[in-house]
């Protein structure tokens, strides 16, 4: 195993070879750097708004989603869709130089695919940490082309971002318009059903006030029925009493009748007179005949008056029964009317709820349709160009100084590796340690190195001696 001091002695012994290798590598790197075509990189900065300043959005983007959103935007920038727009905008497909380069490439792909692949190889998009800025860079052999392509990529990306936001809304507008038209038809149909029902039943509506009036009328009829039923029961009872009773004098209706009472009084007086006359005269006496005729006349009148009273009671009972029937009929009709009103109220409520439901669905769909229609007309995005790309003044590659430094480092490593390989294959003695390693014997003495002048003099003397030495035949 070689130590560092031994390696340094080997390099010092082969200094000429070391220098030659390093110079050769550095020269080759320099020549390649000078010969290589210059490449220019133009960069553009975009700022992405994630604070929710878009009027069509409701809230800002969550901070946790910002990196994902920006990474998605960089992928969109490097997409084939954006590259195709750049190619169309820059007219690369019709550029004679580009077409000639495509033919020389011998690619099996079509021109557009070849252009997309090469354009995407030259573009790069990246974001910085804790920043909403996206940087687009484009590499080209011409600085103006690099700047123009970077700006074209920014414009194509903004256009694509707008399309990604607007195109779905435009596709949804047609669907929402169909839904709005259908819901409008359902609302009109519900309104027509309500109008037809009101026309068929002759009602405009059943409110609580009308129901209260009808219920009050029902209560009034019920009270009236109770009264007429009581009157009917009383009339039936009085009729039954005057029809079945044998003691008419004790009946209240007869006792309250002044005509009957007068006739009774006159009849009693006539009978008393007849009794008095019958005691004096015979039955054929004119006074007796007159008194008897008077009694008979009064009895006839009394019976007639009692009959009239009985007939009046019977008639009143019949009238009371008819009134009870009429009131009961009116009560049933009122009940049917209230039931019909409640049924109408329920049916009207159902029809009105259908209208409200249809109107709610129609309003919601119309609002969403208007929102979607507005979104389909948006002509701005949350992306803006912060710094436009400018033609670079200095090429990004080749970097001659950096390449020379790298070449120097590579040359040094190559020279060290090659010299150590040669040293291992043809080992030389360069110190007392090497001698001890070769012979496994201890070194007893070491002569000091001669001065440089003495070494040069010795080499000259040795060469002179070699020239003076005779040659053998």
Image (tube, rainbow, N blue to C red):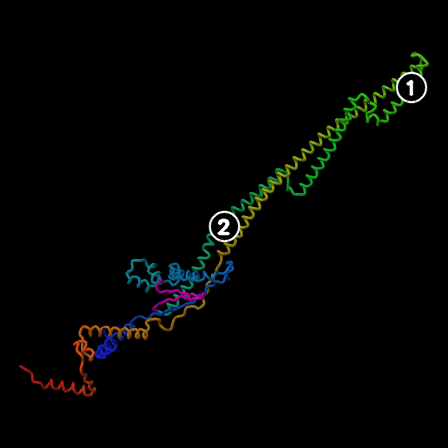
**How busy is the neighbourhood of tag 1: few (under 14 within 10 Å), some, or many (20 plus)?**
some
In the rendered structure, find residue 272 and report the number of the disc placed on it: 1
The relative height of residue 199 versus residue 277 in the rendered view (above or below) is below
**Residue name at image x 18 percent, y 88 percent:** 454
Which of the two residues, 326 or 236, is positioned nearer the viewer here?
236
Residue 343: percent from the left, percent from the top? 62, 38
Vertical placement of 94 versus 25: above or below?
Answer: above
Q: Residue furthest right?
A: 280
Which residue corresponds to mark 2?
176
Residue 188 belongs to magenta span: no
- Magenta highlight range: 120-141
Classify the position of the C terminus by image quarter.
Answer: bottom left
Residue 278 in the figure: left or right of residue 232: right
Left or right of residue 343, residue 264 in this image: right
Per the image, is 124 magenta?
yes
Q: Nearer the viewer, residue 341 or 18?
A: 18
In the image, residue 244 lies at what x, y percent? 77, 21
Q: Is residue 160 depicted above or below 321 in this figure?
A: below
> In which quadrant of the rendered view does residue 219 lie?
top right
Residue for point 67% across, 41% down: 211
Looking at the image, which residue is at 20% across and 80% down? Answer: 432
Choose top left, top right, bottom left or bottom right for residue 413. bottom left
Q: For label 2, count other residues whose C-alpha is less than 10 Å away and answer few (under 14), some (14-19) or many (20+).
A: many
Position of 416 with respect to 181 (left or right) is: left
- Disc 1 vs disc 2: which is toward the camera? 1
Q: Which mark is residue 322?
A: none
User: Whole-Å distance between the Cαs marked 1 and 2?
Assistant: 113 Å
| Secondary structure found at label 1 | helix
Picture quadrant where residue 328 is located: top right
Q: Residue at x 56, y 48 (%)?
A: 360
Where residue 213 appears, as percent x and y from the top left, is: 69, 40
């Amino acid at each position: 195993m070689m130590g560092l001091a031994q390696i340094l002695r080997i390099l010092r012994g082969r200094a000429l070879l070391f220098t030659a290798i390093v110079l050769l590598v550095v020269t080759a790197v320099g020549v390649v750097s000078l010969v290589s075509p210059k490449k220019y990189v133009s960069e553009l900065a975009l700022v992405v708004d994630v604070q929710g300043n878009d009027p069509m959005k409701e809230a800002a983007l969550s901070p946790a989603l910002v990196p994902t959103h920006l990474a998605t935007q960089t992928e969109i920038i490097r997409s084939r869709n954006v590259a195709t727009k750049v190619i169309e905008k820059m007219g690369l497909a019709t550029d004679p130089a580009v077409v000639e380069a495509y033919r020389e490439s011998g690619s099996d792909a079509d021109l557009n695919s070849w252009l997309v692949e090469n354009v995407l190889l030259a573009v790069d998009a990246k974001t910085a940490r804790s920043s909403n800025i996206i940087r687009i860079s484009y590499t080209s052999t011409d600085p103006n082309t690099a700047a123009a392509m970077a700006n074209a990529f920014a414009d194509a990306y903004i256009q694509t971002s707008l399309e990604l936001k607007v195109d779905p809304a435009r596709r949804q507008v047609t669907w929402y318009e169909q839904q709005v038209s259908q819901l409008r038809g359902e609302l009109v149909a519900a309104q027509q059903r309500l109008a037809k029902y009101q026309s068929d039943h002759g009602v405009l509506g059943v409110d609580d006030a009308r129901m209260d009036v009808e219920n009050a009328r029902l209560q009034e009829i019920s009270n009236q029925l109770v009264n007429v039923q009581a009157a009917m029961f009383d009339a039936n009872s009085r009729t039954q009493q005057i029809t079945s009773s044998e003691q008419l004098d004790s009946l209240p209706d007869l006792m309250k009748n002044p005509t009957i009472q007068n006739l009774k009084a006159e009849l009693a007086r006539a009978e008393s007179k007849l009794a008095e006359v019958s005691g004096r005269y015979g039955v054929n006496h004119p006074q007796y005949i007159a008194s008897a005729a008077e009694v008979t006349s009064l009895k006839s009148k009394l019976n007639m008056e009692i009959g009239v009273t009985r007939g009046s009671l019977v008639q009143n009972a019949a009238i009371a029964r008819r009134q009870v029937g009429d009131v009961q009929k009116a009560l049933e009709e009122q009940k049917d009317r209230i039931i019909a009103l409640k049924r109408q109220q329920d049916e009207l409520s159902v029809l009105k709820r259908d209208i409200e439901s249809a109107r709610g669905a129609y309003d919601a769909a119309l609002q969403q349709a208007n929102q979607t229609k507005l979104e389909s007309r948006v002509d701005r995005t949350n992306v803006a160009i912060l710094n436009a790309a400018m033609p670079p003044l200095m090429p990004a590659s080749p970097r001659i100084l950096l390449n020379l430094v790298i070449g120097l480092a590579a040359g040094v490593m190559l020279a060290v590796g090659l010299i150590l390989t040669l040293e291992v294959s043809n080992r030389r003695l360069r110190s007392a340690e090497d001698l001890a390693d070769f012979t496994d014997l201890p070194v007893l003495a070491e002569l000091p190195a001669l001065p440089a002048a003495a070494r040069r003099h010795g080499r000259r003397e040795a060469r002179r001696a070699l020239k003076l030495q005779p040659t053998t035949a």
